[in-house]
Amino acid sequence: MTDARTFGFMLTMPVLAISQSVYAKDYLSVPQAQKLLFPDAESFAPHTVSLTKAQKKAIKKLSGVRQRWDEQKVWKAVAGGKTLGWFIVDEVVGKHEFITYAAALSADGHVLGLEVMSYRETHGDEVMQADWRAQFKGKTLGDVFKLDEDIANISGATLSCRNLTDGVHRLLALEKLVLNRG
Amino acid sequence: MAEHLRSRPLLGTYVEIGVPGDGNAATDRAITCAFEAVGHVHSLLSFQEAGSALRAVNAAPMVWHDLPPAFARVLRLSLLMMRRSGGLFNPTVGGALIAEGALPGCGDDLPLPYGTADDIELIGNCVRLRRPLALTFDGIAKGYAVDRAVKALRQAGMRAGWVNAGGDMRAFGDHAIPVSRREADGSLRPIGALQNGAIATSLVAPHAGDRFPSLTVSAGAGVPMPGVWTVSARYAWQADALTKIAALAAPQHRVALIRALHGALIAGPQEVAA
């Protein structure tokens, strides 16, 4: 996060300054994600899963992805006495990213939907020397520099979501091996 | 200002869609429609996904294919950009990307590394590849998907909003969004505010990595200049494609060429180093 005072100060510095900070966004709470992914559900019954070593090993074998934790937060989405599917909150960790997401799986083991709940990324903040703004003179990206706002959008090389895709494979294995057994 | 934001994994990256305000059922529906628009483009144009319309075309060159309208539109835009950039933008480099390991193979036979605009026959919504090539829209599809999402938001009644598909973004309406650029070393640098326009950034690295899987290759002449390339334009498909042209253009022509193709180079590696 960069605020105007820090930035103003940095502009007077003659050299590049770099500091570590966390880029973070919270998108959805658990109830919000539940409502989006299972709009027809009447209730969500908590169904915390505790995994044995053997189950974790089996999940790894089936999905090719390591199940790091012993407990997985799962809710059973129910309407009219019928199970609509499973709502699972999961986390994936990348080199710089930490992502919490919600997955909706059908009772027969298909992905019904995915929503990112929160995203964290650690990075170096870079504030260039005073004349860096001059480089953008005459360029057409918007008309103003809003230095007093949090920097909320990153344009950059496309970040892979492979970690999350792997996470979903792991959850599908968990569903098949553990949840399906009631 | 309050904003209603959501994010889904799509197009191999994280797609974020936002509208100003606290959010309600109508904004949620609009954002869901916009995600579905992105998902539709993904299902048509994914090189990786079995069953995509693009895979079907690549699997059977020299045969006429009836394309879904969005596919034909992207192909038409790609050919336009290809011709106007003198071939710097090239959607036929799938074979070269497979050979580099940046894209998965699509059968036993390796396609030709790349072709020319004349290798693609497009009549109405029907296409035929004249030679065994592999089309890839990795240089334009993400931007196009962003444009489709913006259209979906507008059709759902949103007066302002923005879509960010892993760094390719577009904002519309009376709402400016602050933008930072991720540099090659992972650091973030503020580059301005975006309003009623699009911006895209591409990293030209020698090899595709796990975290940033894209790779820019040259079809014939020229070597992509390593660095981070950022271009703004009216539409996201333009900005997306123009970053590849920026990386491949001869330095003395780069700025003028991008401008002639209705974009603006925001910051290339040489500016960063200045």
Image (cartoon, coloured by chain):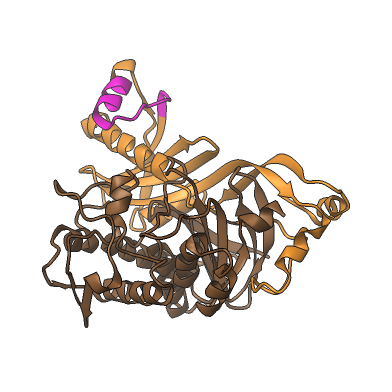
Q: Position of residue A172 (x, y in %)?
A: 28, 38
Residue A137: x, y in percent?
A: 73, 70
Residue in the foreground of this view, choosing between B132 and B3: B132
The C terminus of chain B appears in which quarter of the rendering? bottom right
Pick the front one: B229 or B9: B229
Compared across the picture, whether B51 is left or right of A76 comes to left
Q: Colour of chain B?
A: brown
Compared with B265, B103 (above or below) is above
Q: Nearer the viewer, residue B237 or B220?
A: B220
Is residue B34 in sight in this rendering?
A: yes
On-image quarter of the N terminus of chain B: bottom right
Q: Residue at x 32, y 58 (%)?
A: B93
Looking at the image, is A175 positioned above or below residue B141? above
Q: Which residue of the protein is positioned furthest toward the top in this rendering?
A: A53
Residue at figure coordinates x 74%, y 42% from the top left: A18
Which chain shows up in orange?
A
Instruction: Name the outermost residue toward the left.
Output: B63
- The total of numbered circles placed on residues is 0
Q: Which residues are magenta?
A: A55-71
Closer-to-camera residue (A115/B256): B256
Q: Is B21 above or below relative to A161?
A: below
The answer, for residue A146, to whether it is visible in the render is: no
Residue B4 colored magenta? Answer: no
Q: Is residue A64 magenta?
A: yes
Expressed as whole percent of the image width and height from the top left, the position of residue A43 reads 37, 48
Place residue B112 in its image quadrant.
bottom left
| Image position, residue A87 (x, y; %) | 36, 44
Tell me the residue at 44%/59% (across/down).
Answer: B222
Q: Is residue B20 left or right of residue A39?
A: right
> What is the quadrant of residue A36 in the picture?
bottom left
